[in-house]
Amino acid sequence: MSATLAAVLLIGIFVLAAVLIWLGLGLARRAQKLEEPPPTGAPPEAPPAAGVDESSAVAAPPAPGLRDRLGKTRAVLARSLGALRGRRAIDDEAWDSVEEALLVADVGVSTTTRLVDELRARASAARADDPEQLVTLLRGQIVDDLSGVDRTLHHAPGGPTVWLFVGVNGTGKTTTIAKLARREIDDGRPALMAAADTFRAAAADQLAHWAERVGADVVRGQEGADPGSVVFDAVDAAGGRGAGVVLVDTAGRMHTKVNLMEELKKIRRIAERTPGALQEVLLVIDATTGQNGLAQARQFAEAVGVTGVVLTKIDGSAKGGIVLAIEADLGIPVKLIGIGEAPEDLVAFDPEEFAAALFA
Ligand code: GDP
């Protein structure tokens, strides 16, 4: 091998080695780069700012209104009224559909019969010949039927106000008391809850829990204590603390019905010892029980004298028509309706709004 060839080979080996080393270094640098964190100042994704809940940045959906909460009753009405609207004339089938609409909404047989008779008279006076007119007339008639009644909750002009809540267990007395206490507090009147259902310790616990949640005071006795003494203490405390309204929770069940009614009468008498304090005896009825609720209501109304009805759970019921039956059969105004379980889910009963929500 000549010296020149050997020199060329040596240079070639050097060049090849240099190229391999350069390639190797390049690959190592790339690998290192991939493992390194991204340079500061340019985060791949900005983390959410501390303390900011992303959901709070999105506008809350509007609270469901009465129309939404009356959805079940509206749906059953709409089915029968749809059949009515589908007719060409106001014939016998059209009248059957009106009757059916009222019965499925739990208006009750006697009130339905009266309403249909009155509607026939209205339709004839208006010379109505279109089923759609009948729907409009029915809506107007329901509003008229429920109008002209005092549905306000009354406050004592001076000294503490007492509102007594009666009704079967589970109808929603405690929840309604909490909702009203919150409303009173929002209106600037202190609220004091009296746990006069001393029959069940859990009832007083539940009331105390709600009192804390809505910012009300609570007066309670030992389990089995005399409910009358709890009411007496509560009214006394309210006078001393300048509490606006005393909301009295009562038992909804005892060993016998006679016991319960006698107990409620006694509570009422004790509340009346402070002249002018007892302003409302509110009967709480669960709308989902429909006509059964009406039978219970009659017993309470006869025993303690009721000034108004709170119809709860209308949101879960297809029997909203019970409002008409309560007013017609018992002659007691429905003052409030419960449209859910949250503290704000209580609305004053307004016939115009109610009919609009049902027929919308
Ligand atoms: P009480 O035994 O009469 O005091 O009844 P509660 O106040 O304990 O209520 C019984 C149940 O009914 C609870 O689960 C409440 O959340 C529920 N409730 C009360 N009012 C309403 C309402 O207007 N709508 C719905 N959906 N539930 C309600």
Image: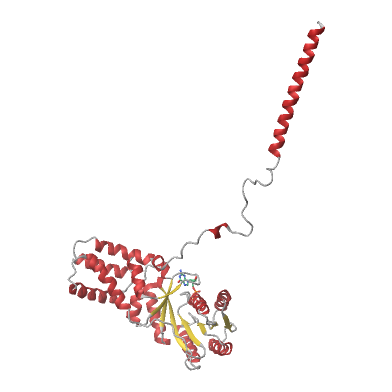
Percent x, y of residue 10: 79, 14
Q: Nearer the viewer, residue 243 or 199?
A: 243
> Which image quadrant for residue 85?
bottom left
- What residue appears at the point 26 percent right and 75 percent down from the top-left corner? 115
Give the quarter of the figure containing the N terminus. top right
Percent x, y of residue 52: 60, 59
Give the quarter of the figure containing the C terminus. bottom left
In the picture, measured across the screen, residue 223 lies left or right of residue 180, that is right
Q: Colour scheme used in the picture?
A: secondary structure
Q: Nearer the viewer, residue 73 or 133?
A: 133
Q: Residue furthest top?
A: 2
- What residue appears at the point 52 percent right and 84 percent down from the top-left corner? 246
Percent x, y of residue 110: 28, 77
Percent x, y of residue 153: 43, 82
Q: Is residue 88 above or below residue 107?
A: above
- What residue appears at the point 57 percent right and 74 percent down from the top-left corner? 213
In the picture, measured across the screen, residue 208 lies left or right of residue 257, that is right
Q: Is residue 25 above or below residue 230?
A: above
Q: Is residue 58 above or below residue 35?
A: below
> Which image quadrant for residue 339?
bottom left
Q: Is residue 334 above or below residue 29?
A: below
How many numbered tags mark residues here? 0
